Amino acid sequence: MAKTKAISTDDVLLMLCTSVKKVLSVATQTQINYSPMVQKITRTCLRPDIGCFVLFDGSFSGLVIINFSAPSAMELYRAYMMSMGMPESELATQHTSEEVGNMLGELMNQIVGDFTGNVGSELLVSINQNQPKMLTINKEVVVSIDTNLDRAQARRVSFSTANRNVFYMELAMDRTEFIQLHDFEREEIDPDRIVDEAGQRETLASTSNQTLVDQSLLDELGL
């Protein structure tokens, strides 16, 4: 009899932590790290200075919150924009600026998108996300899902930037367990590879078309 393998909510949390680190590291071209110690919490909150949250549902439901301090938000914002070629003189100088919130919302959307893609690849289940919401706040705001979770669990993980500014990710989701009954092939989902292959196909097609045009022209000239 094949040995079964169980994947718990903490394994799902690890997948989310990996997505946070991966997306932010690539976007800002800086080193992002997270603590190996996970904190069990009883409620999820938006905390100062910038709170960002997104809901997901499908095979299981959950809530993801990332709370940025002003220094961590500004460091990520500046690194991201400058890696995109934005002159430093044109950058926002306050964490309350709309550009900072929009950038963090965009990165949050990429993080959860990467996470849902990994969940689909690793667990062969589907979850959907809604649009991330950003709030600049100076007090804690308790956030919960408007539907009852099945024995909800909440976790909090500490992240640090290259300059040692700290921000926190909180996850609330169903207490669940996935049991792998037998081995299966995981579908590789790599957006960069897909884009590269599509570009290569377009280049080959363009080259082929150009060759046909050149040959037709030579035939017309009798060469």
Image: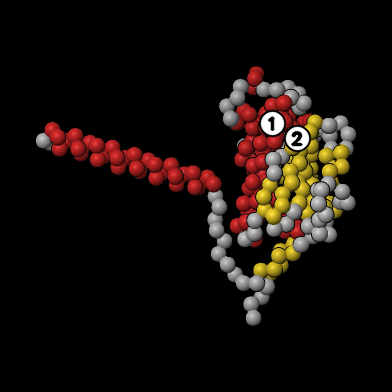
Discs 1, 2 touching: Cβ within 8 Å: yes
Residue at the left extreme, as displayed: 222
Left or right of residue 1: residue 53: right
Identify the residue shown where x is 58% and y is 30%: 84
Amino acid type assigned to the residue bearing label 2 in the image: Met
Q: Is residue 18 visible?
A: no
* Camera-nearest residue between 39 and 37: 39
Identify the residue shown where x is 67% and y is 32%: 103
SS state under label 1: helix
Q: Earlier in the sequence, mark 1 or mark 2?
A: 1
For mark 1, what is the residue?
102
For mark 2, what is the residue?
134
Q: Position of residue 181 (x, y in %)?
A: 65, 72
Identify the residue shown where x is 74% and y is 54%: 61
Image position of 164 with respect to 187: above or below:
above
Q: Position of residue 121 (x, y in %)?
A: 60, 57
How far apart in space, not on screen, are marks 1 and 2 (Cα)?
8 Å
SS state under label 2: strand
Amino acid type assigned to the residue bearing label 1 in the image: Asn
Residue at the bottom extreme, as displayed: 1
Q: Residues within 10 Å of mark 1 (few under 14, many from 20)?
A: some
Which of the image's four quarters has the C terminus? top left
Q: Quadrant of residue 123?
A: bottom right
Q: Position of residue 8 (x, y in %)?
A: 74, 62
Residue at the top extreme, as displayed: 89
Q: Position of residue 18 (x, y in %)?
A: 68, 50
* Camera-nearest residue between 20 and 120: 120
